[in-house]
Image (spheres, rainbow, N blue to C red):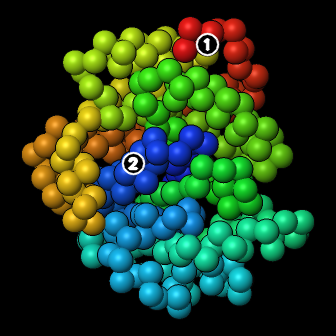
Amino acid sequence: MNKETKIIAIVNQKGGVGKTTSVINIASSLSVKNYLTLVIDCDYQANATTLLCGDEQMQDKKHSLTLAIKNELSLKEVVIPTKHKNIDIVPSHHDLDSLKDQLIGQPNQFSLIKSLLDCSLTKKYDYIIIDTHPSLDCFFQSSIAASDYFIIPIFPEADSSRGLIHQIQAINKMKKFLNPNLEFLGSLVVKYDKYSSTHQKFEKLIRQFSQENQLNMFKTIIPNSHSVAAAAAFNLPINAYKNTSPASKAYAKLAQEIVSLTNKHSTKAKKSKTLQKELDLEVAKDL
């Protein structure tokens, strides 16, 4: 059977909602299941790069997304292995930020990631996970244009929950022009405190909203955990730091959900139709 590479963008226009943490731990949880995984760090904060490769990687400008875009290089010319088995990365660098203004109006401004992946090496990977910056710039839209799926990590709190609707609507508009086959894989509740009545309330509201609008929401909930922050301090995914922690077990369950969802071709047609409609904000007035 031919292997099909699945490309997933992790997105949210609100900063600090756990996008990079989700990218790193999803990639690591897939890798321990023997799925060869590529991370593309499309965020000029480059946190995914430092977490997977260490701070010293920021000194290497021979392998970076910036270099690839400037010189129209392919994946094989900029990809590097990480210190973790089955995970490679296209590193980012802070100088990616200065590149975005130069790309405005260029014919390729929304095909930057597609061009990068247009080589035989791409087919080597089971999963490609893209970390995105919280903006609607050309790097974000290029990530959307190149992806098969997207996931929105979300806090079970008022501001983050309301942002879910606007995020989906914004991506729907991009989907129409850039990538009609893009599918919403699901919203992912992160940093959930089961003892917080606020978290309980908003997790329930988000799930109700998702059901009413036929939008997927992952069954797995990522619990709030000091171990995740501690792991990040050591530049480690949670399963490499403390694989017995509730958060590590949750990410393992999430990875299995992702594998199951992306392997269900019948789900693809259903989700594609769902994302073509406009969401009714009135349905979400309680969020």
Crowding around mark 1 (Cα neighbors within 10 Å: few <14, some 14 to 19, many 20+) is: some
Residue at 33% across / 45% down in the picture? 255
Circle 2 residue: 22
**Residue at 65% of width from left, 69% of height from top?**
97
Residue type for callout 2: Ser
Q: Is residue 241 visible?
A: yes
Please say if 141 is above or below 163.
below
Residue behind mark 1: 284
Q: Is the residue marked by circle 2 packed among few (<14), some (14-19), or many (20+) residues within 10 Å?
A: many
The answer to whether 274 appears left or right of 92 in the picture is right
Q: Position of residue 251 (x, y in %)?
A: 28, 43
- Residue at the image point whose x is 58% and y is 23% from the top: 162
Name the image quarter holding the C terminus: top right
Q: Position of residue 270 (x, y in %)?
A: 62, 27
Check the picture and name the quadrant holding the N terminus. bottom left
Total numbered labels: 2
* Helix, strand or loop under label 2: helix
What kind of residue is marked 1?
Answer: Ala
In the rendered structure, the answer to whether residue 163 lies left or right of residue 206 reads right
At 61% from the left and 77% from the top, the residue drawn is 95
Q: Position of residue 249 (x, y in %)?
A: 19, 41
Image position of 169 with respect to 9: above or below: above
Pointer 1 with pointer 2, Cβ within 8 A: no
Left or right: 145 with respect to 223? Answer: right
Query: Could you say which is closer to the camera, residue 266 or residue 200?
Result: 200
Residue at mark 1 to residue at mark 2: CA–CA distance: 25 Å
Residue nearest the viewer, comparing 21 with 270? 21
